[in-house]
Amino acid sequence: MSQDVACSAKPAVFDYDIAIVGGGVVGATLAASLKHSGLAIAIIEAQSQSDAIAKGQAYAIHQSSRQVFDDIGVWPQIESQIEFFRQVRLSDADSPHVVEFESSELQAKAIGYVAKHRILLQELQSFLTTCEQVDWHCPAQVTTTDYDAKGATLQLASGESLRVRMVVAADGAKSQVRQQAGIKTHGWPYWQSCVVATIAPEKHHDNIAYEKFWPSGPFAILPSAKDECRVVWTAPHKEAQALLDLNDDQFIDQLHHRYGNQMGQLSLVGKRHLFPAKWMHANRYVQPRLALVGDAAHSCHPVGGQGLNLGIRDAATLAQVLTVAHQHGEDIGSLMVLRRYQSWRRQQNLLSLGFTDILNRTFSNQWFPLVQVRRLGLQVMQRIPPLKVWSLKFMAGLHGRSATST
Ligand SMILES: Cc1cc2nc3c(=O)[nH]c(=O)nc-3n(C[C@H](O)[C@H](O)[C@H](O)COP(=O)(O)OP(=O)(O)OC[C@H]3O[C@@H](n4cnc5c(N)ncnc54)[C@H](O)[C@@H]3O)c2cc1C
């Protein structure tokens, strides 16, 4: 805990250096990446730790996120529980021209991985039990946050209050911390929703992921366990709701229709879920005493599985900026320090967010000349290896400056 002797109407003693509001994967990654910073950290999470883990979501995890987890030291434990994909087959509806991305093009065993939320958060929580400078406050809801020249005071629903040097909002797309701080966002809802399901195919998935662009929206199948795949089926809202309302046999029938029979008989594992797709970007990521990370700063169309991966990079970058600033005796909550994080991440995120939007709109468009151009584009990409490798690296988050490589 830190002492501050400057004159202020607020208490001079800080309970913590940093309060991270939101103990999801992004908030927990930030706390874990700050392990060697020497900073005292509070994670304030609205749900109990076990409820926060229980979310049934799974994510495509890119090489950029693997590097972050590797640096923290949790990757071996995560990797042993998740599935990888070594090839991605990308195609435009029923066009015979398929672009095949191979892991060898990244000089890696895998292009990416699919990890259940439960596994990621459990391993991060377990790592954080070894970090003496990190305290969990959960279940605990932040109700208000007051900022002043020296720090911030958070009021919790329990009546407790915490005095900190700075706050990080990792509280998701509807971030109350961001809204209360008056940071505006821009963006739009899409005309589509995503139906997410897990299937057990009769034949092994062979560690191949499929992304097919249909006029109604992208359709992805990703290997998510030894004998399971995750389906993310995007369609206009009404069509997506109708898919959700089908009984299991009818849904499997529709799936065979869309996907073919290359994996033999399919059966459903667990429930299907529906998520409306939206695009959102905060007008700024920082202001004095506050930084936004993950979905609190941005959210995008699920095509290409970018959202969480961008948040993990935000977390690693902010951790690095704060660690270096603290080592140099700088005020970690000052705008001068926090702007380094913003200028590092905001443009990179905007590029990836823009990429998901263009991909979705271009491939959902049935204007004949555009269909011809994009199909030609896929053929060209398949035939020009440097272009294919560049695209693959971009999708895998291996572009721009990386916090782990500096
Ligand atoms: C259909 C679909 C598929 C997706 N697939 C992928 C994919 O394959 N790969 C990928 O990278 N991304 C994917 N995403 C995006 C991904 O789900 C999000 O980017 C990611 O979950 C954001 O994580 P987060 O930690 O920033 O926020 P969240 O997961 O929303 O966590 C926020 C946390 O803050 C807590 N909280 C909220 N308010 C408060 C408060 N006031 N006080 C205290 N705690 C609070 C919440 O309880 C929660 O634990 C997908 C999204 C959708 C919709």
Image (cartoon, rainbow, N blue to C red):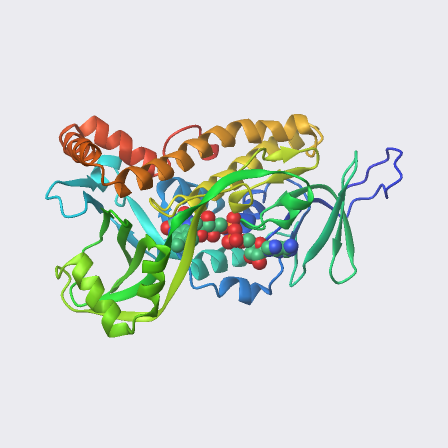
Is 296 located above or below residue 107 in the figure?
below
Question: Picture coordinates of residue 135 (x, y %)?
Answer: 66, 55
Left or right: 189 in relation to 388? right
Hey, which quadrant is residue 92 in on the image? top left
Residue 314 in the image: above or below residue 155: above
Residue closest to the eye, 305 or 259: 259
Instruction: Determine the residue positioned at 35% across, 41% down.
Output: 63
Left or right: 331 in relation to 37: right
Of residues 312 and 263, the one nearer the viewer is: 263
The answer to whether any part of residue 205 appears in the image is no
Q: Is residue 120 visible?
A: yes
- In the rendered structure, the answer to whether residue 117 lies left or right of residue 249 reads right
The spot of residue 18 in percent (x, y) is: 68, 44
Image mark count: 0
Please state, as top left, top right, bottom left or bottom right, where the N terminus lies in the image: top right
What residue sits 43% from the left and 64% below the top? 56
Residue depicted at x 69% and y 34%: 333
**Image quadrant in which you'd find residue 88:** top left
Q: Position of residue 59 (x, y in %)?
A: 38, 53
The structure residue drawn at horizontal position 70% and vertical position 33%, both measured from the top left corner, is 288
Q: Is 10 on the left or on the right of 357, as rendered?
A: right
Frontmost residue, 263 versus 13:
263
Q: Nearer the viewer, residue 324 or 281?
A: 281
Q: Quarter-wise, where is residue 334 in the image?
A: top right
